[in-house]
Amino acid sequence: MTPSPFSIIGHRGARGVLPENTLEGFAETLDMGVRALEFDVFLTADEVPVVTHDPRISPVIARGPDGDWVSDPGPYIRDLSLAEVQSYDVGRLKPGTPYALRFPDQVARDGLHTPTFADLLELMTATADSGPVLGLIEIKSDPTDPAFSDVAHRCAARICEMLQHHPLRDSMRLQSFDWNVLALAAAIAPDLPRSYLTNTGSDPLSEYPNFYEGSPWLVGSFDPEPWKMIDALGGVAWAPYHTQITAASVAAARRAGLEVYPWTVNTAEDLERVMGFDVTGTITDFPGRALHLQAGEQRRA
């Protein structure tokens, strides 16, 4: 169950340079030498887990069969069949949008479609022959939205079922900002490793805080040190926003036996800072950039 000493984790594959959450993007990320992937999973109307970040078809990524960009807001994944979800082309960003401007180096690949979780598991299994591969599987949820959280709970249960006897089970980490989802996973698959996402909201660039006293996203009594709560809940990993950790907090979590995976660390400056801590790995949109920095650190060691 122990990952490699330091993992560079491709966020949605390699979102900074490749079409996100596509089988082709994940394959190219693994071909870089990356041995860990982070991705989100949603459930379709016909109960198939698919790999995509948003609860709706994204208007800044998706085009319909007619080639037109999806109108905002797009339809909910939970209201579409697998065939309908996969009818959208998700191989390029909509030009001129703020999202596209964030990732000007992302290549466009027309004709790519949303993969199923089973598709991605098959890809990761095939590449596991050349070394261990880590997967951080995020279940998006909102405990204040009953319809959203209900689908999230059913999605988590389905993922637990699919991984029950899978050869990669021990190298997977089920994670969520909604710790209620992880409580369900702990009840039905207690041996499936769980990673607890946190966001205190202290950074203006971080959205949707979940870690504060009285939060509906948490379970159990509150402790200002997240790792203490995670350890008490039987989690194996803490996944904090990268600006909300210190060398001391990481060291304390590591002493408790937890893995630590800060997200989403993209600039060279931030990567160097986080990689200087005793983190288990770092989640990044630019895994190639992180690999280059890691190689430099290894040469200096």
Image: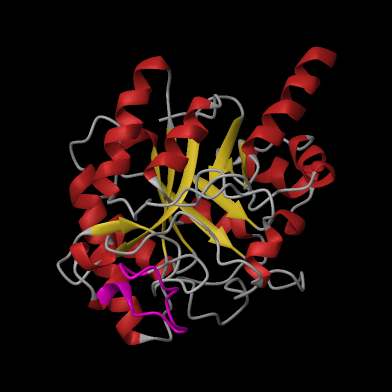
Secondary structure predominantly adopted by residues drawn in magenta:
loop
Q: Position of residue 66 (x, y in %)?
A: 33, 70
Q: Is residue 109 left or right of residue 245?
A: left
In the picture provided, is 68 more to the left or to the right than 17? left
In the rendered view, would you say 217 is above or below 18?
A: below
Q: Residue at x 52, y 46 (%)?
A: 237
Does residue 34 belong to the magenta stretch? no
Looking at this view, name the residue that lies furthest to the left: 46
Closer-to-camera residue (213/29): 29
| Residue 171 visible in this rendered orientation of the protein | yes
Find residue 47 and report its horizontal and vertical position in percent. Answer: 17, 65
Q: Residue furthest front?
A: 66
Q: Is residue 225 left or right of residue 72?
A: right
Residue 301 seen from this side: no
Viewer-proximal residue, 128 or 277?
128
Q: Quadrant of residue 289?
A: top right
Query: Does residue 77 belong to the magenta stretch?
Result: yes
| Residue at point 61%, 35% (across, down) | 280
Q: Report whether 269 appears left or right of 8.
A: right
Q: What span is in magenta? A: 64-78
Compared to 216, does 40 lie above or below? Answer: above
Q: Is residue 66 above or below residue 290?
A: below
